[in-house]
Image (tube, rainbow, N blue to C red):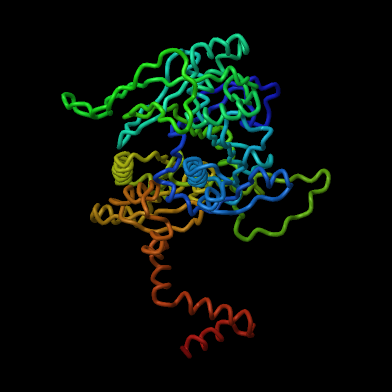
């Protein structure tokens, strides 16, 4: 959707705008379970990574697989690595060149205080390396802030396979009141941090306070990251009872598992029990936690700019001469004569128009059978869900090919005289020429199946143009030329002409006659 930013100086086309298009994924994970079941599918990808240590040491990017990066701790976890890999695959599939994509890790001074790890997908363009996608492990910051603002618990529940016993400790009421007097506005932050700590962590904190008279506690939340000194007399804990919950998915009417003997109610303030004393425990059937979020954020306008730059090229004309010196002052120069055709090499899967229908020339258009053939072809293209254009202008076929190449149309269907003759004799046997934009190669296919073939080439199907060209090699050429090639005449003529140019005889025709007579 649309996003807005107070950009002081919009510039660089679609790169820096006040209003731009953004797409995001919010993927929630367990804080301690960030392995991804599909990570193996992208783990072998070799990517250009620019970790934070490399940047601080002014070293170039390193090339490694995602599996190696996660194992080495360069990328924090598998889920973050999975989305890095999928982002790379998306950018390449959309038309960005793989050699101009890298992933840069945020430096310590630019990474958000709540983020576990953050990487930017940067694409090299004419403006240099431009950040186009951000992939961040934002921990539990978002849900924690929303829960605090709305006073609504945003937590997830996950049933334990086997009920577990959990020690429950918390601040006594008197200690909580004393914290309020000591820390005032920060008391809620300190008490909240203590509530999140496990029994083992509270024991360690209490032991430090007893040994040193105070203990340090670091609180990182939406209010920032601060360290507080807590006096030993304020760290007074008591055992608190918990409630065993019904496991999720258990049928109604089924008896709950026996929770065991109920612990006695705590009277007054109970000091933290020594290790030799059995601690009060609670049987837990359901785990509650605040999910962490992995957030890939895509700048659509910047990605589109990269696709335009990476797919555009100028096709050299056949027989181009070396560049001439600039004309002298006063000389007139025809700018249209020197214009070279541009090509937008959009991948067929993302090209707005998939094909263009072209009659070979206006004589084809004037044939009475052409209209019916064209309408039937348009119907089959629509049935396949393909966007297409029809160009029946009087321009030459070469100029119309160039027009479609500039629009990024990957395929062109050409209807010629042979196609009309075949259609008149038997509509089912009619064939047409299919031209591919990037290689300009052509194959001849049955008119009845050509729309289905284009649909396969423009989808996630495994069919590629090279495979199709290999299966129908030579079918897109003129029938006479195809015959000469099939019989080996083309190769013999080419060799004879080459030898003729080398020998330079006085009578070339006589020389050629003698050469062919000797075959």
Can see residue 90? no
Q: Is residue 314 left or right of residue 403?
A: right
Q: Position of residue 355 (x, y in %)?
A: 42, 45
Q: Position of residue 231 (x, y in %)?
A: 63, 20
Q: Position of residue 107 (x, y in %)?
A: 67, 37
Residue at the (70%, 24%) spot, across then down: 9
* Vertical relation: 105 (above or below) 112: below
Residue 41 vs residue 291, the one in the foreground:
291
Residue at the (52%, 11%) spot, across then down: 174
Q: Is residue 519 left or right of residue 217?
A: left
Residue 206, quarter of the rendered image: top right
Question: For the image shown, how many numbered marks are present on the structure?
Answer: 0
* Vertical relation: 182 (above or below) 211: above
Residue 249, quarter of the rendered image: top left
Q: Residue furthest left?
A: 253
Residue at the (35%, 49%) spot, across then down: 456
Q: Residue furthest bottom?
A: 518
Can see residue 76? yes
Residue at the (51%, 41%) spot, across then down: 407
Residue 216 vs residue 85, the one in the foreground:
216
Residue 73 vs residue 283, the one in the foreground:
283
Q: Residue furthest front?
A: 276
Q: Position of residue 147 (x, y in %)?
A: 47, 18
């Amino acid at each position: 959707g649309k996003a807005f930013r107070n950009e002081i100086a919009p510039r660089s086309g679609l790169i820096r705008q006040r209003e731009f298009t953004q797409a995001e994924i919010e993927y929630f994970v367990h804080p301690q379970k960030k392995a991804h079941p599909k990570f193996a599918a992208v783990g072998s990808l070799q990517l250009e990574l620019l970790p934070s240590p490399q940047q601080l040491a002014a070293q170039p990017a390193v090339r490694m697989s995602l599996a190696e990066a996660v194992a080495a701790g360069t990328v924090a976890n598998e889920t973050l690595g999975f989305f890095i890999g999928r982002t790379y695959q998306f950018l390449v599939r959309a038309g960005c060149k793989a050699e101009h994509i890298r992933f840069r890790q945020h430096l310590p001074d630019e990474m958000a205080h709540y983020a576990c790890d953050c990487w930017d997908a940067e694409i090299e363009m004419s403006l240099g390396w431009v950040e186009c996608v951000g992939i961040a492990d934002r921990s539990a910051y978002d849900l924690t802030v929303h829960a605090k603002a709305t006073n609504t618990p945003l937590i997830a529940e996950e049933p334990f396979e086997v009920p577990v016993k959990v020690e429950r400790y918390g601040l006594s009421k008197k200690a909580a009141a004393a914290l309020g007097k000591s820390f005032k506005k920060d008391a809620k932050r300190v008490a909240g941090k203590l509530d999140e700590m496990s029994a083992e962590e509270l024991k360690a904190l209490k032991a430090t306070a007893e040994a040193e008279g105070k203990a340090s506690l670091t609180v990182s939340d939406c209010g920032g990251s601060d360290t507080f000194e807590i006096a030993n007399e304020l760290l007074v804990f008591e055992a608190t009872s918990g409630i065993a919950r019904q496991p999720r998915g258990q049928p109604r009417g089924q008896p709950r598992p026996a929770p065991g003997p109920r612990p006695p109610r705590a009277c007054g303030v109970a000091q933290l029990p020594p290790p030799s004393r059995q601690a009060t425990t609670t049987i837990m059937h359901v785990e509650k936690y605040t999910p962490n979020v992995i957030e890939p954020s895509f700048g659509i306008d910047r990605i589109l700019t990269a696709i335009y730059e990476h797919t555009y090229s100028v096709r050299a004309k056949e027989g181009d001469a070396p560049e001439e010196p600039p004309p002298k002052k006063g000389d007139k120069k025809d700018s249209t004569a020197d214009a070279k055709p541009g090509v937008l090499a959009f991948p067929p899967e993302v090209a707005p128009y998939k094909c263009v229908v072209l009659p070979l020339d206006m004589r084809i258009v004037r044939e009475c059978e052409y209209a019916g053939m064209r309408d039937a072809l348009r119907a089959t293209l629509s049935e396949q869900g393909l966007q297409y254009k029809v160009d029946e202008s009087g321009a030459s076929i070469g100029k119309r090919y160039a027009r479609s190449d500039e629009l990024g149309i990957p395929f062109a269907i050409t209807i010629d005289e042979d196609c009309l003759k075949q259609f008149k004799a038997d509509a089912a046997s009619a064939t047409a020429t299919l031209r591919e934009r990037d290689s300009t190669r052509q194959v001849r296919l049955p008119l009845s199946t050509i729309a289905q073939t284009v649909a396969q080439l423009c989808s996630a199907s495994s069919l590629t143009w090279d495979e199709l060209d290999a299966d129908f090699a030579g079918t897109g050429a003129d029938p006479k030329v195809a015959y000469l090639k099939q019989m080996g005449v083309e190769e013999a003529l080419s060799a004879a002409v080459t030898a003729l140019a080398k020998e330079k005889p006085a009578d070339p025709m006589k020389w050629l006659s003698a050469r062919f007579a000797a075959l």
